[in-house]
Amino acid sequence: MSISNLHQNISQIRSRLSEAADRVQRSRDSVKLIAVSKTKPVAAIKRVYETGQRDFGENYVAEAIDKITACESLDICWHFLGPLQSNKTRLVAAHFDWIHSVDRIKVAQRLNDQRPATLPPLNVCLQVNIPAEATKSGVSSETALLELALAVDKMDRLKLRGIMAIPAPTKDPLEQREQFNRIAGLLNIPGLPAGMTELSMGMSSDMEAAIAEGATMVRIGTDIFGARYT
Ligand SMILES: *Cc1c(COP(=O)(O)O)cnc(C)c1O
């Protein structure tokens, strides 16, 4: 993907997002677009930033910190999306605004302890994987989700915002809708803390279905930055 295509790609994604929201009578502003820049160079981030995009997502800690440092003068809201080992929490706590992939109390506790006092609380989505698929991270039962949510809600350097999911890939739009509908339903589990309103779901190949089922944040990589080769 050449850098000159990026402006065109982002404007196509914005149109897709608006049309998807229109179709289900949602306002365009009710869905935040996160540009997932993992494996892509800083120059590409800057090109997309020029179009007004402010939310960017990264998956790999070391790569992300290099890019965040290189983009220090830009007004970017950084979202951490990848699996996180507990020995890397300090860097995420110090450099990100959001993390979407918290699925264990231990990781949450470390992020809470390590969030610098000079920064606002770290925004957190809990990653869910219900029904559980063998290969993926995420809490795998409603009971585990409730338990984790109640624990995170008590941590004052974390701000519990909602849930994130990556359903099993399928090209069938009806199946996509069904999966996202089930994920959205998890926000109605009795006893969940108030304030869990964010639904981080939908990627390049299924963002329309996710928006139809209530996604408040879609995470788009390939259809903005092109295919990844690493
Ligand atoms: C890579 C990634 C994305 C973006 O996926 P695309 O299919 O390239 O749009 C979104 N969310 C997570 C968690 C990812 O790891």
Image (cartoon, rainbow, N blue to C red):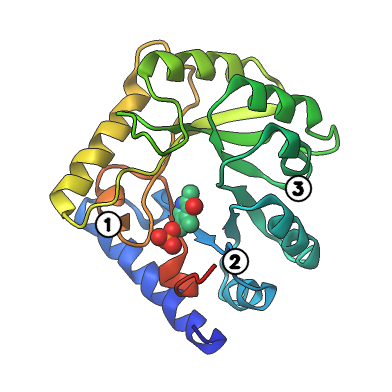
Q: Amino acid at mark 3?
A: His
Query: How many callouts does the rendering have?
Result: 3
Could you tell which of marks 3 and 1 lies nearer the N-terminus? 3
Q: Residue at x 23, y 51 (%)?
A: 25
Between the residue at mark 3 and the residue at mark 1, the CA separation in whole angstroms equals 31 Å
For marks 2 and 3, the one nearer the N-term is: 2
Amino acid type for the residue under numbered disc 2: Thr
Mark number, residue 132: none
Q: Is residue 142 above or below residue 38?
A: above
Residue matched to label 2 = 39
Residue under the image location 34 percent in, 70 percent down: 15
Report helix, strand or loop for mark 3: helix
**How dense is the environment of label 1, judged by Cα within 10 Å: few (below 14), some, or many (20 and up)?**
many
Quadrant of residue 75 in the image?
A: bottom right
Judging by the rendered image, the residue that carries numbered circle 3 is: 95
Between 171 and 32, which is closer to the camera in this rendering?
171
Residue that mark 1 sits on: 208
